Amino acid sequence: MAGNCSALNQSLMELGALVCTPRNPQCLICPVKKLCMACGEGRVDELPNLGERQQATARRFMAFVIERDGKFLVRQRPVGVVNAHLWEFPNVELNGGKVHAKKIFETEFGFAPAAISPLTMIKHSITRYRITVEAFKLNLGKAAFSKNGAIWKTPAQMQALAFTSAHRKILRAGTGG
């Protein structure tokens, strides 16, 4: 059943992206024209009422792919925020100019890592946000460490988790998964 829901959702998104576009609908070739209220009522030019588009907001984050004994530190996003319940690597929203990963890590986690290296940069858009995530990788060796709400998972265990889209890309870059 879930596969059918997924296929329906995907087909509706394809229809909206390719045929029933807001600015240039292709009603003559639409496979659901007979069911379309806008077409039936002659209101194709009125719908959807897009209104004024909000200005895109740029947001910058720094994420940390922290490894210890073959496991990685991940956390679940809290209730009440965008992408609630999805998984992510520990990260910090940046405000302002040039920042250094080692200093941000030390501020966030309370200690300076021995080594930290750039992993990847992800550019991602969600609704009106244009998001840039700079990801860094570090290995803690055998050091005991945890962060409130974060847990250690193997790459195989992380494959079963629902990551945010941007952090799924970081996962692929950082663990090959």
Image: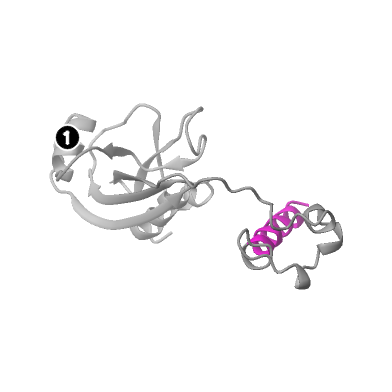
Q: Give the colour scheme of this rendering.
A: one colour
| Residue 12 picture quarter | bottom right
Say left or right for 58 vs 41: left
Q: Nearer the viewer, residue 155 or 58?
A: 58
| Residue 30 picture quarter | bottom right
**Quadrant showing the C terminus:** bottom left
How many marks are shown on the rendered structure? 1
- Find residue 23 and report its horizontal and vertical position in percent: 60, 61
Residue type highlighted by circle 1? Glu
Q: Nearer the viewer, residue 176 or 14?
A: 14
Q: Is residue 76 above or below residue 100?
A: above
- Find residue 158 and report its horizontal and vertical position in percent: 47, 48
| Residue 112 picture quarter | top left
Q: The magenta stretch spans which residues? A: 1-16
- Find residue 171 and report its horizontal and vertical position in percent: 40, 54
Which residue is depicted at the point 27% across and 51% down? 134
**Local SS, label 1:** helix
Crowd band around label 1 with a 10 angstrom C-alpha radius: few (<14), some (14–19), many (20+): few
Say left or right for 112 vs 8: left
Q: In the displayed image of the protein, which residue is found farthest to the bottom? A: 29
SS majority, magenta: helix
Q: Is residue 70 above or below residue 27?
A: above
- Find residue 89 and report its horizontal and vertical position in percent: 37, 43
Which residue is depicted at the point 31% across and 31% down? 146
Q: Is residue 115 magenta?
A: no
Q: Nearer the viewer, residue 86 or 99?
A: 99
Q: Which residue is mark 1?
A: 106
Q: Is residue 15 magenta?
A: yes
